[in-house]
Image: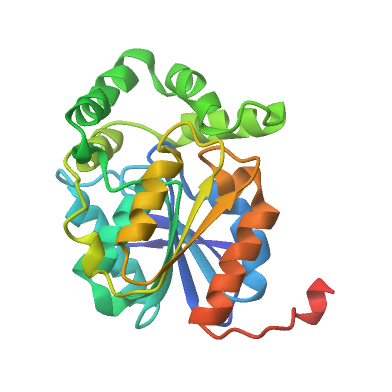
Amino acid sequence: MTAAHVEAVHVEEAGSAGPLLLCLHGIGSSSAAFAPQLAELSAYVRVVAWDAPGYAKSADPGSLLDLDGFADAAADLIRERGASAHVLGVSWGGVIALRLAARHPELVDSLIVADSSAGSGTDPAKADAMRQRAAELAELGPRAFAERRGPRLVSPDAPPQLVRRVVDTMAASVRLPGYAYAAESMAGADLRPEIPGIAAPALVLCGDQDRVTGVEASQAIAGALHRSAYVIVKDAGHLANQERPEAFNAWVLSHLRITARIPEQEPSSCL
């Protein structure tokens, strides 16, 4: 695994062959959330996981970024590395991925949207709550903010070491103003009108114990997309890719074997 910077956006990369898989994290996380995907899926594809602008090791944006701005930053990463990519987005990252596919369809070969939604702008109460998060972060600081919010992102029976890893990742990743820009991008987002126009084939996944966006939001995305498959990940909360990485990666790999035509047989190094 190597680390790199592209125009002040920090990424973690693994794998040297095959199609590109760009991973976009949730609003309280970073590229660290994709450690299981970087480790396992890189045997088949080139995996790139970003720290969104204003998060973790990425530089703070020079000015306010809205959802289009985050989507355009992701588009720039794809252009740096090739003509197009398969895009995996978790939660807020899924909202960015959907906007990316609508705004830059030529760059998106397929979508994997996990534990996500059409945006908080679909409900005024959710939008208000999202906008209040920046003030909460400013008041509490990253560590206390993460301790308050992190445990809810996994299932009630998640092992303590996973809970601690999620909290530590959040504490090390979020800061202002980047988090405030992200929260506002979610609060203002209602992608329901544009999702049906997305042509890229999509896999939509959701943990059956997701207490944040919930299975209904993922079902709505899958039902609105032009070409989609919908999967429930058992015994997983909002961070299904971290809580059940074996099952999650197996579904992603199955999707990529169809959409990217990667080989059916596992590499000899994995046997």
Instruction: Residue 92: give x, y in percent of width and height.
Output: 35, 45
Front-most of residues 160 and 118? 118
Front-most of residues 181 and 217? 217
Instruction: Residue 264: give x, y in percent of width and height.
Output: 68, 83
Q: Identify the residue at image location x=40%, y=43%.
A: 216
The relative height of residue 93 versus residue 229 in the rendered view (above or below) is above
Instruction: Residue 234: give x, y in percent of width and height.
Output: 64, 45
Q: Identify the residue at image location x=54%, y=80%.
A: 258
User: How many tags in the picture?
Assistant: 0
Q: Is residue 36 left or right of residue 218?
A: right
Front-most of residues 55 and 165? 165
Instruction: Residue 126: give x, y in percent of width and height.
Output: 25, 29
The relative height of residue 53 versus residue 271 in the rendered view (above or below) is above
Q: Quadrant of the C terminus?
A: bottom right
Q: Is residue 222 left or right of residue 238?
A: left
Q: Is residue 203 left or right of residue 70?
A: right
> Given the current orientation, which residue lies at the most extreme right position?
271
Q: Quadrant of the N terminus?
A: bottom right
